[in-house]
Image (spheres, rainbow, N blue to C red):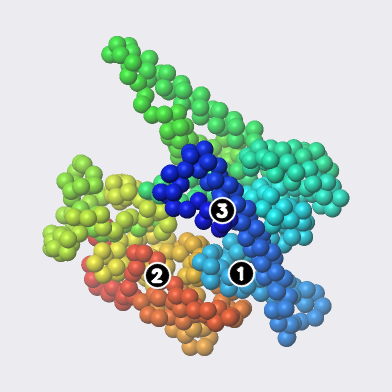
Amino acid sequence: MEGSAQSLGSPASVAAMDPSDALGALTEAIVAADRLIAQMQASREMLLALALALVPSLLNDDGVPTGADAVQADSRAAELAERSVAAEIGTATRTSDRTIQRQMADAVDLVVRFPSTLQALSEGRISLAQTRIIRDAAADLDDDSVRTGYEARVVAHAENSAPQRLRRFAVREAERVRPEAIGRRFERARAERRVWVSPLPDGMAELTAVLPAAVAHGIHGRLTEMARGLKDETRSRADNDRGDSCGEVRTLDQLRADLLADLLLTGAPRGVDDPDGQLAAIRARVDVTIPVEVLLRSSDEPGAPQGDPGRRGTRRGELGTERDSSVRNHGIGRHQGPVPELNGQFSLDPDTARRLAGAESSWNRVLTDPLSGAVLAVDRYRPNADLRRHLSSRDSRCRFPGCGIRAPELDLDHTEDAALGGATAAGNLAGLCRRHHVLKHHSRWTVRQMGRGFLEWTSPTGRIHRDDPPVPATRTMTPPSRDLDPPPF
């Protein structure tokens, strides 16, 4: 590949070539680069498989009980050793250790069960994307001879097929040789139906649902029909009222999204065992972190909502002009400043944040000082201790390097064990997800507090990794006296 790229010379020399010759040379260089990338990816898969093979040699059998307890202890020790290996690689490569652990398992599966596919990847005849398609389509083919025949046919097809076309071919080939009837497999797969949310930029998020195919297509079809009906209705109404063709300006995609949100947020559930209608009374509940500056900003400033400035959303009158003046004197308001957050993960636009502050009662508020970063006030659906609330706002995600599990799912861990004299204080507590809480206590990973919420982790091989408090950073502060005025909301 390097020789092909060098033979092309500089961009100026390429421009001087015959266009057809230049395009041909560039195409050959790109093909060579893709081949080299595939070969390196195959090497990485084999290295990940080797890393997982190290796990048994890292186990410590001292003090392991005998009998049935020994089996359970061995299994737990193996899992912890595997997590520790994944954490070592993940922190070194700036990758989630969960991702590395999954990649190691996938690599072993590829090496052991799909050797012909790995060989084709290592020779650059197929890409990593094609490799994953071949493996995923036949993940449940346990018969070695059946899987080998499938692999030979699909790998040959992959060498001259784009990934999207390969996927259809691989699924058909796997279905053709699969021993279990699709009805049984459907019932098993149906048990895995679920819904989850993933963050997107600019205050948006992606709601994903795994459903039976007929139900998913039915939902999409109904939303499409409703969206088209709405466009037709508004267009007809506009024609009758004004004699023009103005009507619904939203696209079908936008209408489908808006209709889905309306139906899910306001509709009563049907087809479930809820004779008293209690499910329909459940309201959505989220955590919204709003920098106090956002609430202080008046309605005539850029980005502030129009309407009554005395609404609870701005709280200008209650907070007082002295605090507002302090904020303005530091230049805040002339730039974007702190951004509200949803569930400690997703950016939220200021208008929505103010609207929630002024009108909603089913969310939790965490007000942060834009100058010091300290927590000013927090209210909750079920109030906890001040320290727990402060740490929840400071550690809005797991404090292990690379982990993004959010605050409601964290354990408050004593960095220095309480049984050994560790204080129950902000300087000795950190939020950890259950996975990394267990890893800290049952492996050779160690952590120490550096002050102001900064943590320093040391891996079993001696690598040092610092984890900073998630933005916006908050400083350790003494809980306010009960004699002081209540929070301003």
Inspect this view and state whether residue 6 appears: yes
> Horizontal placement of 419 versus 255: left or right?
right
Task: Give the class, few, some or many, for how many residues have Cα within 10 Å of label 1's Cα (few <14, many ≥20).
Answer: many
Residue 428 rendering spot, x and y as whole percentages: 43, 80
Are the residues at dot 1 and dot 2 in contact (C-beta closer than 8 Å)? no
Residue 264 rendering spot, x and y as whole percentages: 48, 38
Q: Nearer the viewer, residue 122 or 463?
A: 122
- Look at 37% across and 55% down and name the residue there: 341
Q: Nearer the viewer, residue 204 or 384?
A: 204
Element assignment for label 2: loop
What residue would you read off at disc 3? 4
Q: Nearer the viewer, mark 2 or mark 3?
A: 3
What residue would you read off at disc 1? 86
How many numbered marks have been drawn onto this rendered protein structure? 3
Q: Earlier in the sequence, mark 2 or mark 3?
A: 3
Looking at the rendered structure, the kind of residue marked 1 is Ala
Looking at the rendered structure, the kind of residue marked 2 is Pro
- Look at 57% across and 35% down and name the residue there: 270
User: Which quadrant of the view contains residue 444?
Assistant: bottom right
Estimate the spatial distance between the alpha carbons at disc 2 and disc 3, rounded to whole Å.
Answer: 47 Å
What residue would you read off at disc 2? 469
Q: Earlier in the sequence, mark 1 or mark 3?
A: 3
